[in-house]
Image: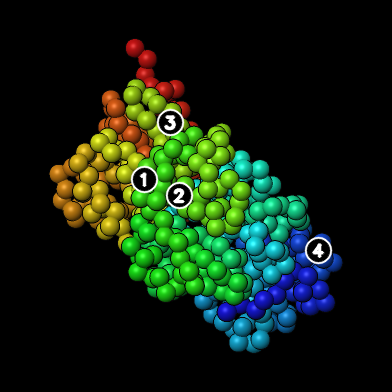
């Protein structure tokens, strides 16, 4: 369990900032707004700039051992030997989200986690709450940290997407949290599947927890009811009313559940209008597709190109495939290897009634190809591609005249790209070249 320390509790302490990614830089600015000059430790030289930064090995870890509290970036595993050494020495190792939750009115905070669906559910919940008249801040793992120095302090509701990494930094839970799904992920960070499940679901049962809104369509989640806190409200497609959500324009049954979870959370928080179909229908207007989540890009020669590259695990990729029943799909898959088992992906593709071409790329491409070929399916073929551009071109040729080219990698982007946005840009550039590079008659 993490110590219940808030940002203001850090005054007068010797504080370390460990990691200078997006959240780490927000931590640094927050501390300086409190007149705290911390020890800074980071291992990526390009992040040093004008700061006095120590590498973790040797001087960095030694300096952190001299701190009272260390604020680590989410990417640093709480199970790492360095974190264990710090905590054994009596240093409090915390995260920015946990510090913020100790200083805010948690009855106005909704934390949303899940292996897949958390970004979409966070976006839907925030959009509906705004449509119902609330001042809403949406952020966390999606967008800006709520403790950033330029973040609002007077929101009616904070909707915070929470990763499994961030969940391990939380000492107190808001009264209502949501879990959209559960499937093994980030196994090297967590040290195995069961550790991942415990870490992610720890968000549901820290002091202050009252209710978890959870997807009844996730078998692994249903099987771990004991980790979901004192009370659970289960949500499935059966609990969803289609009338109110039509303006959301959602694709796929999984997004139906995401929308139902978002509504259930607002109801449990007592948001006026959340129980009224007509009011929610009006609030749903103007919702735009989430970037890189089943986001339509264009149609060329009858082939739809769809960017779903935020799907970095098997479960969301299968949900994306299921959004196009009866259609031929050229699926572009592969990326950073995080010890994910791709057999379930291959098995599910084999069960499709229509043909699928799996265009495998980058680090996990060979693993995915082996699993697909092991199925010996007459309807599923795997082809190795050197890069995203080749996969897009091959997919377009194969998918004509009425199929789908779907970028849904079931893997993270960081082996070949800066992040998912970079991967999405390269995908769009490759689509553009299909027409500009085509030979003329």
Q: Residue furthest top?
A: 441
Q: Nearer the viewer, mark 1 or mark 3?
A: 1
Query: Can you say whether 32 is above or below 396 in the image?
Result: below
Q: CA distance from mark 2 to mark 3?
A: 34 Å
Residue receiving disc 4:
32
Q: Decide which of tag 4 and tag 2 comes sooner along the chain.
A: 4
Precedes in sequence: disc 4 or disc 3: 4
- Distance, label 1 to label 2, CA atoms, is 11 Å
Which element type, helix, strand or loop, lies under badge 2?
helix
- Given residues 390 and 304, the one toward you in this image is 304
**Badge 1 vs badge 2, beta-carbon distance below 8 Å:** no
Residue linked to disc 2: 260
Q: Provide residue 167's location: percent of width, then percent of height.
A: 55, 67
- What whole-number distance in Å separates the C-alpha atoms at marks 4 and 3? 45 Å
- Between 46 and 10, which is closer to the camera in this rendering? 10
Q: Are marks 1 and 3 in contact (CB under 8 Å)?
A: no
Relative horizontal placement of residue 116, taking residue 20 as reference (left or right)? left
Is 376 displayed left or right of 87 in the figure? Answer: left
Q: Which residue is mark 1?
A: 253
User: x%, y% of residue 124?
Assistant: 53, 45
Q: Residue at x 33, y 47 (%)?
A: 360
Name the residue located 41 percent from the left edge and 47 percent from the top edge. Answer: 240
**Label for residue 224?**
none
Q: Residues within 10 Å of mark 4 (few under 14, many from 20)?
A: few
Q: Which label lies toward us, 1 or 2?
A: 2
Whether residues under marks 1 and 4 lie with C-beta atoms below 8 angstroms apart, the answer is no
N-term mark: 2 or 3: 2
Residue 431 left/right relative to 325: right
**Secondary structure category for the residue under label 1:** helix
* Coordinates of residue 329 in the picture (x, y in percent): 29, 38
* Residue 35 in which image quadrant: bottom right
């Amino acid at each position: 369990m993490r110590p219940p320390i808030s940002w203001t509790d850090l005054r007068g302490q010797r504080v370390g900032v460990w990691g200078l990614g997006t959240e780490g830089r927000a931590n640094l600015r927050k501390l300086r707004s409190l007149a705290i000059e911390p020890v800074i430790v980071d291992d990526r030289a390009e992040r040093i700039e004008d700061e006095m930064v120590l590498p973790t090995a040797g001087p960095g870890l030694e300096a952190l051992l001299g701190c009272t509290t260390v604020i680590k970036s989410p990417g640093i595993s709480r199970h790492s030997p360095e974190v264990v050494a710090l905590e054994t020495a009596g240093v409090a190792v915390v995260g920015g989200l946990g510090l913020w939750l100790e200083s805010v009115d948690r009855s106005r905070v909704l934390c949303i986690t899940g292996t897949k669906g958390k970004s979409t559910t966070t976006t839907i919940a925030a959009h509906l709450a705004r449509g119902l008249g609330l001042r809403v801040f949406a952020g966390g793992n999606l967008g800006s940290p709520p403790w950033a120095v330029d973040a609002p302090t007077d929101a009616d509701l904070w909707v915070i997407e929470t990763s499994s990494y961030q969940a391990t930094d939380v000492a107190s839970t808001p009264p209502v949290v949501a879990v959209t799904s559960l499937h093994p992920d980030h196994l090297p960070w967590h040290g195995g599947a069961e550790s991942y499940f415990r870490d992610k679901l720890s968000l549901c049962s820290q002091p202050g927890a009252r209710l978890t809104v959870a997807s009844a369509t996730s078998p692994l989640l249903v099987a771990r009811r004991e980790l979901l806190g004192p009370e659970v409200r289960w949500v499935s497609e059966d609990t969803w009313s289609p009338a109110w959500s039509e303006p959301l324009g959602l694709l796929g049954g999984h997004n139906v559940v995401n929308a139902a979870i978002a509504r259930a959370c607002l109801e449990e928080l007592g948001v006026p209008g959340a129980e009224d179909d007509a009011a929610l229908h009006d609030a749903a207007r103007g919702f735009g597709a989430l970037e890189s989540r089943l986001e339509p890009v264009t149609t060329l020669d009858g082939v739809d190109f769809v960017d779903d590259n935020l799907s970095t695990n098997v479960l969301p990729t299968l949900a994306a495939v299921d959004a196009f029943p009866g259609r031929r799909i050229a699926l572009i898959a592969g990326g950073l290897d995080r010890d994910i088992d791709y057999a379930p992906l291959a098995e599910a593709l084999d069960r499709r009634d229509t043909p699928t071409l799996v265009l495998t790329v980058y680090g996990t491409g060979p693993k995915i190809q082996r699993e697909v070929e092991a199925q010996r399916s007459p309807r599923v073929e795997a082809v190795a591609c050197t890069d995203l551009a080749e996969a897009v071109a091959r997919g377009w040729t194969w998918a004509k005249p009425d199929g789908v080219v779907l970028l849904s990698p079931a893997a993270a982007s960081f082996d070949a790209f800066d992040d998912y946005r970079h991967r999405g840009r390269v995908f769009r550039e490759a689509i553009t070249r299909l027409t500009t590079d085509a030979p003329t008659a």
